[in-house]
Image (spheres, rainbow, N blue to C red):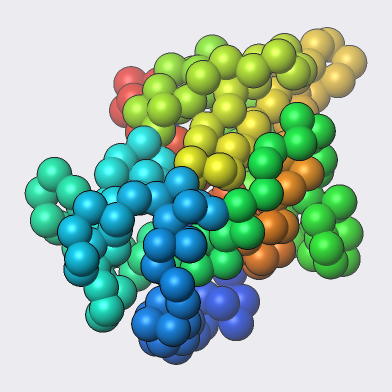
């Protein structure tokens, strides 16, 4: 059975969950909702409700208080997910995808934070899936993952309508250990901050790890 260890760091983003959420709700109350729906790909389905897709599920952003509910059950999303959803919705610039993929080192400020990012995301990706890359393809299906043409095996996951994250694995051989990387469209900083990108990627990795069958 695969042991799942929480890799949450003690970054300011994570230490200040409640403050981050409060600030995001305050920004939500001030923005042009219709404009942000166009920029983010969300849809205003009722005067007090915006529908948005996040990790292959539909959520409702409730206006004006900023509660985030699963569309099919009405269950409130975890605080970390609520912050990510609100940050994406309120910050989206509507920039079209470029088709050019970049690494975390290439996002603003990413190179200095890359060691921490790698430890939080690439290391657990390779540790849990490097020796069995086919497993990544299997468990990513729950998040809407689809095959991408990179490395030995790669899957792309549409975290939001306009944010796709690509997970890449190389199997390795007798001389080289398995390896991996994580890629983003070059426009990602028009939708999420550098820290949000790290938090979102880490969230995806650990959702995948937790879905590894216990028999593996």
Q: Is residue 30 left or right of residue 64?
A: right
* Residue 88 image position (x, y, % from top left): 51, 60
Q: Count the marks.
A: 0
132 versus 116 height, above or below: above
Residue drawn at x 48%, y 25% as measured from the top left: 145
Residue drawn at x 52%, y 75% as measured from the top left: 14
Residue drawn at x 71%, y 63% as measured from the top left: 194
Q: Is residue 175 left or right of residue 69?
A: right
* Residue 73 image position (x, y, % from top left): 10, 49
Residue 31 seen from this side: yes
**105 vs 52, nearest the viewer:** 52
Which quadrant would residue 181 be assigned to in this image?
A: top right
Which quadrant would residue 49 be assigned to in this image?
A: bottom left
* Residue 57 image position (x, y, % from top left): 30, 41
Residue 123 seen from this side: no
134 versus 95 height, above or below: above
**100 vs 84, nearest the viewer:** 100
Residue drawn at x 29%, y 56% as measured from the top left: 44
């Amino acid at each position: 059975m695969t042991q799942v260890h929480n890799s949450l760091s003690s970054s300011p983003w994570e230490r200040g969950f409640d403050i981050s959420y409060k600030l995001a709700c305050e920004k939500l109350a001030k923005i042009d909702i219709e404009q942000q729906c166009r920029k983010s790909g969300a849809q205003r389905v009722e005067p007090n409700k915006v529908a948005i897709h996040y990790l292959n599920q539909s959520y409702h952003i409730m206006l004006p208080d900023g509660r985030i509910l699963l569309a099919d059950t009405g269950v409130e999303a975890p605080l970390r997910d609520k912050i990510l959803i609100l940050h994406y919705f309120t910050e989206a610039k509507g920039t079209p995808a470029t088709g050019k993929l970049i690494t975390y080192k290439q996002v603003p400020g990413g190179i200095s934070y890359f060691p921490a990012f790698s430890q939080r995301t690439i290391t657990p990706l390779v540790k849990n899936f490097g020796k069995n890359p086919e497993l990544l393809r299997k468990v990513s299906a729950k998040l809407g993952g689809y095959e991408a043409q990179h490395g030995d095996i790669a899957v792309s996951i549409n975290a939001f309508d306009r944010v796709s994250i690509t997970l890449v694995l190389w199997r390795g051989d007798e001389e080289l250990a398995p390896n991996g990387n994580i890629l983003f469209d070059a426009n990602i900083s028009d939708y999420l901050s550098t820290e949000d990108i790290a938090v979102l990627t880490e969230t995806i990795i650990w959702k995948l790890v937790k879905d590894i069958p216990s028999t593996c």
